[in-house]
Amino acid sequence: MGCNCSKGIRANEIEDNNKNVKARRSKPKNSNKTSKKKNKSVSSIKANVGSEERAGFVNGSSNESTLKFLIPTDAKNNASSDDGEKKENLERKSSRSIFQRRPTTENNNLATLQQQPKMIRINSVSNGEKGAQVMAGWPSWLAAVAGEAINGWIPRKADSFEKLEKIGQGTYSSVYKARDLETNQIVALKKVRFANMDPESVRFMAREIIILRRLDHPNVMKLEGLITSRVSGSMYLIFEYMEHDLAGLASTPGVKFSEAQIKCYMKQLLHGLEHCHSRGVLHRDIKGSNLLLDHNNNLKIGDFGLANFYGEHQKQPLTSRVVTLWYRPPELLLGSTEYGVTVDMWSTGCILAELFNGKPIMPGRTEVEQLHKIFKLCGSPSEDYWKRSKLTHATIFKPQHPYKRCVAETFKSLPSSALALVEALLAVEPDARGTTADALQSEFFTTKPFASDPSSLPKYQPRKEIDVRLRDEEARRKKGTSSKQNESKQASKAVPAPDANAELPASIQGQSNQISTSEVLNPDRDGTAQSGYTRYGMSSVNRNGESVMRGSSPPRKDLRSQRSFVQRGGAQLSRFSNSVAARDASHFAIANPRWFEDSYNGRQNDGDWSQRLLVKPKHSTKAKDSRPGYGEKTERMNYSGPLVSSGGNLDEMLKEHERQIQLAVRKARVDKKTSRDNNGQTQAFLAPNGR
Ligand SMILES: Nc1ncnc2c1ncn2[C@@H]1O[C@H](COP(=O)(O)OP(=O)(O)OP(=O)(O)O)[C@@H](O)[C@H]1O
């Protein structure tokens, strides 16, 4: 932000913006459309998106300056009235905005804009705000539903950036390295995906933007601006470019962190988190690949896609289906919908132990397995906790015999101060984890060796988690279809914090088109969820604005849509399942896509989604045919209620669970082979025609 806002603005007034683009575009046909499209419908806008984007980024230099994004103003409710309670939730903390410049009517005057070299502000008169935002260059679909997110800013234009290479692939976004042609700075552009510009998708992106705008700390990724245009159907978030992420760095062969170095990273993480928490923001996806590092080892927390506000005034329940599985605290696995900073503290504990351990400490493949791993390491909660908690899944997962905690034995090689902090952060009972301030004051940071200064640490070759993933996949491909032995080895030697949410590039598995979509029940307590696409098209929100599930299926009433990562190669299973559940899918979606369909088909009016965690034996499919829309699929499994009674046998459940995973792995392998054979046939078929 700073770099651009401090620069003078050549305010080629807003209307001219698109004309300027036109002049530079290789396809004048596309650009000619721009000025005529003010009142275009969403679908017609969409039709232009592709051409605009193709023409959008330039490959050469451009001397032409474009309008800058601006110093943000205080967040303010300016979205359409249909935002309802979601809006309320997003705005709860708006009075604490760090950016206090309010737009005024006069500032809409373009002459005024030109006189203000350091910022441009947009008119925000109550009824004219949307119009002003559109006039300022925002697409109307965005101004209509995400006014607060863009309030006071003006979009940057794609052609003022040179796209260099793709550097990250998240589940919901692609990240590119690019050069800002106006500052010559290297930046990261996160392209967010929308499904048909559905308002819910847009609102989710807006939440990320609003949260990012409210944060301002050296250890938190700063949103520098946004790229879009009046005729665009997509959006790029502009960030400072970071060379590494902690996951990638930690898994670099030969890289071993010293204690002082771990302290350095942990300290920065805790300071960044402290800032988020102090601003009422829960990150809810702390993991190594979301901890970005620049070449000087400065760490910034990134990816606020799952973040949300929390606080005393939080009336709506939060979703428990957040945080990448390996870093997800037990209370979320048990279905808690009332929580606070303690969820981030748990993830922090996992990271701390992982940095010393050299690999993830609890790489569960499914929610059930994750909980089991947690209990085995951290002990099961006390009787009193079970009584007090009233957690959704408490009755299902309460073990018959308590598990003994063995953190100290497991991590006996850790320095005592580090172990003490791990013990605190990995407390099964949330309140015992303390706060970021408690952690920062712990012996770990106050005793020698002290945290290194970031700039004193070794400079590493740029390496990202995505590189690690690609390398691993390449190695796996070279080795051929991995044996069962190999698979389990890979699973256990997983690189730190693999981003299992991410879709692997299609090339890796050659099966990207097999990502299927399924849906699950609306876990909203009161069934009031607004269904539809969210977070860039892959989830649904409840009235709290919570992302609960993601998918790409069409909106359906009372359902959460989600993407289920199925039919990938077996070797991918552990990676995907590691966080699929975190962002969306239940493990059953991974193991057997049909289970999910069935849960949807069979239980669409049922708000109780705990059944997803249970495996119903095949013979228990009695009720299926009577369910509307169930169909004839005899192989299907479905749910008709808890299968494990209160105080059920977790071990048996896990055994059955493991069996199902193995089945899914085998099936995925067969599918992969079939797909390869089919491809081979197709190619053979095409070859005679000279391709
Ligand atoms: N500012 C940045 N500089 C460099 N690389 C970045 C930056 N921001 C993100 N990346 C890379 O892109 C990846 C994906 O970004 P991000 O996590 O924000 O997207 P996402 O869609 O939410 O991902 P996921 O679903 O995997 O959590 C990151 O893991 C990181 O490697």
Image (cartoon, helix red, strand yellow):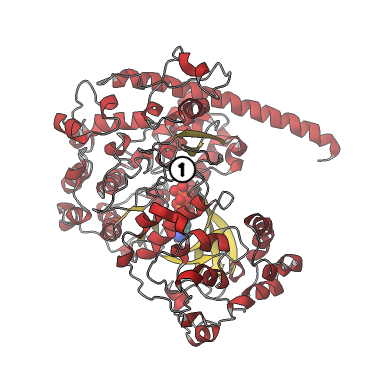
In this orientation, which residue lies closer to the viewer: 516 or 170? 516
Quarter containing the N terminus: bottom left
Circle 1: element type: loop
> Can residue 634 be seen here?
yes
Left or right of residue 395, residue 508 in this image: right
Left or right of residue 258, residue 531 in this image: right
Quadrant in which residue 222 is drawn? bottom left
> Can residue 301 be seen here?
no
Looking at mark 1, is its residue's CB closer than 8 Å to ligand 1? yes
Number of numbered discs overlaid on the protein picture: 1
Q: Is residue 641 above or below residue 163?
A: above
10 Å neighbourhood of mark 1: few (<14), some, or many (≥20)?
many
Q: Amino acid at mark 1?
A: Asn
Residue 653 x, y percent position in the rendering: 34, 20
Left or right of residue 228, residue 493 in this image: left
Q: Is residue 18 above or below residue 430?
A: below
Q: Residue at x 38, y 26 (%)?
A: 611
Residue 15 x, y percent position in the rendering: 62, 76
- Residue that badge 1 annotates: 501
Quadrant in which residue 245 is drawn? bottom left
Which residue is outermost to the top?
619
Residue 439 x, y percent position in the rendering: 20, 53
Q: Residue at x 55, y 16 (%)?
A: 634
Which residue is outermost to the right?
689
In this orientation, which residue lies closer to the viewer: 464 or 396? 396
Quarter containing the C terminus: top right
In this orientation, which residue lies closer to the viewer: 472 or 395? 395
Residue 51 x, y percent position in the rendering: 69, 60
Q: Residue at x 62, y 69 (%)?
A: 159
Q: Residue at x 58, y 40 (%)?
A: 508
